[in-house]
Amino acid sequence: MKKEEIRNLLKQKPSEVIKVVMFGPESTGKTTLSQQLARHYNTVWVPEYARDYLQNKWNNERKTCEQKDLIPIAIGQMNLENDLAQKATDVLFCDTDLLETKVYSKEYYGSYVDPLLDEAARNNDYDLYFLTYIDVPWEADDLRDRPLQREEMFEAFKKALEKHGKKYILLKGDKKTRLKTAVKYVDELLKKKKNQS
């Protein structure tokens, strides 16, 4: 695939909906929160494409993520997001984004990030990030592999948001507490948008 083709596949399509990203290390409740918020606002949420892609790879080849998988994963993620943005009501909840893929690339592959992934991670735009803290129990599965480096991974995600100047809210506590906090901030975004229109 040519560079320009990849570049186009990693771009967000224009959309009027508010976009909110769950962001943070593995096993910190991002999927649960995405589902809860989508239910609360009667809208759709964007699952993490990498989970199906890598589960498939593990089932078929007994291999985990390799550097060469990152661009296909990123393309799959953006395809899902662009598709679901057309089906969302007022707000779209994303279980992940390309900045998260960039963090994993840096942490797992000796600081290497594909320039096209880096460009898309910087250019794609979201209204708010919820940074999920590591105060929920670790849940093992075929793909999760850093139970002893949760603090280190959390710091990497936090630094990425700060470095890229992303607006974020730190979410701590149990599921109920996190949902309540998240709803408060999403309501504010919806109110602001209504007032502007």
Image: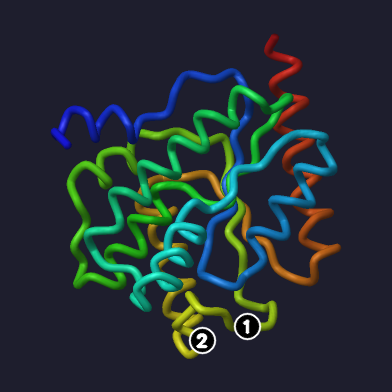
Residue 187 position in % (x across, y down):
79, 35
Residue sitting at 36 percent across and 41 percent down?
75
Question: Left or right: where does residue 31 sit relative to residue 68?
Answer: right
* Residue type highlighted by circle 1: Trp
Which structural element holds mark 2? loop
Residue lying furthest front: 60
Residue sitting at 27 percent across and 68 percent down?
66
Between residues 193 and 60, which one lies in front from this camera angle?
60
In the rendered structure, find residue 147 and report the number of the disc placed on it.
2
Cα distance in 3D space between marks 1 and 2: 7 Å
Image quadrant in which you'd find residue 19: top right
Q: Are marks 1 and 2 in contact (CB under 8 Å)?
A: yes
Q: Which residue is mark 1?
A: 138
* Residue type highlighted by circle 2: Pro
Residue sitting at 48 percent across and 75 percent down?
143
Question: Left or right: where does residue 44 sit relative to residue 105?
Answer: right
Which structural element holds mark 1? loop
Mark 1 crowd level (few <14, some 14–19, many ≥20, 10 Å Cα): some
Residue 149 position in % (x across, y down):
45, 85
Image quadrant in which you'd find residue 188: top right
Mark 2 crowd level (few <14, some 14–19, many ≥20, 10 Å Cα): some
Quadrant location of the C terminus in the rendered image: top right
